[in-house]
Amino acid sequence: MKKIIYTNKAPAAIGPYSQAILSHNTLYCSGQIALDINGKLIKTNIKEETNQIINNIQAILKEVKMDMSNIVKTTIFLKNMNDFSTINSIYAQQFKDYPPARETVEVSALPKNANIEISVIAVK
């Protein structure tokens, strides 16, 4: 069973992929960059970018009646590992009690020249 998930409360995909796929009770959320609802990249600073990404992820989760507590795995892609402590403090606020498994990887480039991208896997 595979169901394509789409919400107009998060930015539309910018390529041939879905915002997320629900398979049985597992949600595979595509990597989110700091696009606002109109598709404009928020690039003021890493804190605002990270918060926009979290808002996008929360909107997708809400579409399938999940929230941040359902996330079991995250992957964070950063253009600059020097931003890690800022991102990590925002991340820690979202996952206070039971943080999911995670990896953080520095990369040379991201779509639309974003500074950060986060993907998640969530389970009901």
Image: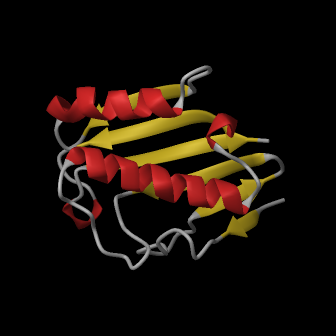
Q: Residue at x 34, y 59 (%)?
A: 34
Coordinates of residue 82 in the picture (x, y in percent):
15, 30
The percent position of residue 111, horizontal first and vertical second, equals 28, 62
Q: Residue at x 81, y 46 (%)?
A: 25
Q: Nearer the viewer, residue 31 or 108?
A: 31
122 above or below 44? above
Quarter-of-image position of residue 15? bottom left
Decide: is 101 above or below 34: above
Looking at the picture, does residue 38 appear above or below residue 43? below
Compared to residue 34, the image places residue 16 above or below, namely below
**Where on the picture, by quarter, is residue 61?**
bottom right
Q: Nearer the viewer, residue 84 or 77?
A: 84
Residue at (49, 59) in percent of width and height:
56
| Total marks placed | 0
User: Where's the N terminus, which quadrant?
Assistant: bottom right
Single out the residue that lies furthest toward the top: 97
Q: Give the percent coordinates (x, y) of residue 6.
A: 64, 71
Q: Quadrant of the C terminus?
A: top right
Q: Position of residue 75 (x, y in %)?
A: 45, 38
Q: Report which quarter residue 32 is drawn in.
A: bottom left
Q: Toward the viewer: 5 or 43?
A: 43
Question: How was this image coloured?
Answer: secondary structure
Is 99 left or right of 26, judged from the image as shown? left
